[in-house]
Image (cartoon, rainbow, N blue to C red):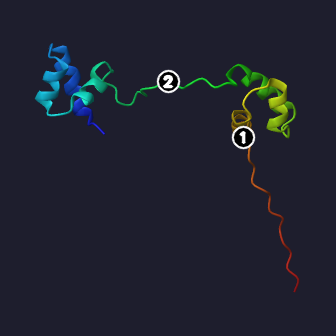
Amino acid sequence: MTEVATIVDIVRLKEQGLSKRAVARRLGICRTTVNKYWSESTDPDKPRYARRPHLIDPYRDYITSRLDKYPELPAYRLYKEIKKGVSEIRAHRAALRTVSAPTKTPRIQAL
């Protein structure tokens, strides 16, 4: 993992007009590392990749409404209704269901 200071140095040297090769040579790092951070922002906490779309994205509202009405509805049934990926529907269904801990019944001990 590249340190934040190195990333900031890459961006600073780029702004000063140095080439990628010159930046790599000056910092003593590989050119591919310079390439990696050349066009990125200086915020290392910002994710580099956006969330990829899923097949069920257009149907999320429909699935949510169906599971609000019928929480016990199996993923395969929803699959048959919309003809998309079962595993993604299962994952979405599991995220929507609230898992409640079983309530404990108080025990009475006989003397």
Secondary structure at badge 1 equals helix
Above-or-below relation of 107 to 21: below
Count of residue discs? 2
- Quarter of the image where one finds residue 46: top left
Q: Residue furthest bottom?
A: 111
Residue 13, which numbered label?
none
Mark linked to residue 50: 2
Give the quarter of the image for residue 37: top left
Left or right: 85, with 49 as reference point: right
Is disc 2 in contact with disc 1, using a CB cutoff of under 8 Å? no
Determine the residue positioned at 74% across, 42% down: 98
Quarter residue 10 falls in: top left
Is 82 rendered above or below residue 16? below
Q: Residues within 10 Å of mark 2 (few under 14, many from 20)?
A: few
Work out whether residue 80 or residue 39 is closer to the camera in this orientation and state it. Answer: 80
For badge 2, the amino acid type reads Ala
The quarter of the rendered structure image containing the N terminus is top left
Using the image, determine if residue 78 lies above or below residue 57. Answer: below
Q: What's the distance in space between the residues labelled 2 and 1, CA to CA?
A: 23 Å
Counting from the top left corner in percent of width and height, residue 29 is at 18, 33
Q: Viewer-proximal residue, 86 or 62?
A: 86
**Quadrant location of the C terminus?**
bottom right
Residue 92 percent coordinates (x, y): 70, 34
Q: Residue at x 88, y 83 (%)?
A: 110
What's the residue at 63%, 26% (across, down)?
54
Q: Residue at x 83, y 68 (%)?
A: 106
Q: Position of residue 19 (x, y in %)?
A: 16, 17
User: Circle 2 — which element?
Assistant: loop
Residue behind mark 1: 94
Q: Position of residue 57 (x, y in %)?
A: 67, 22
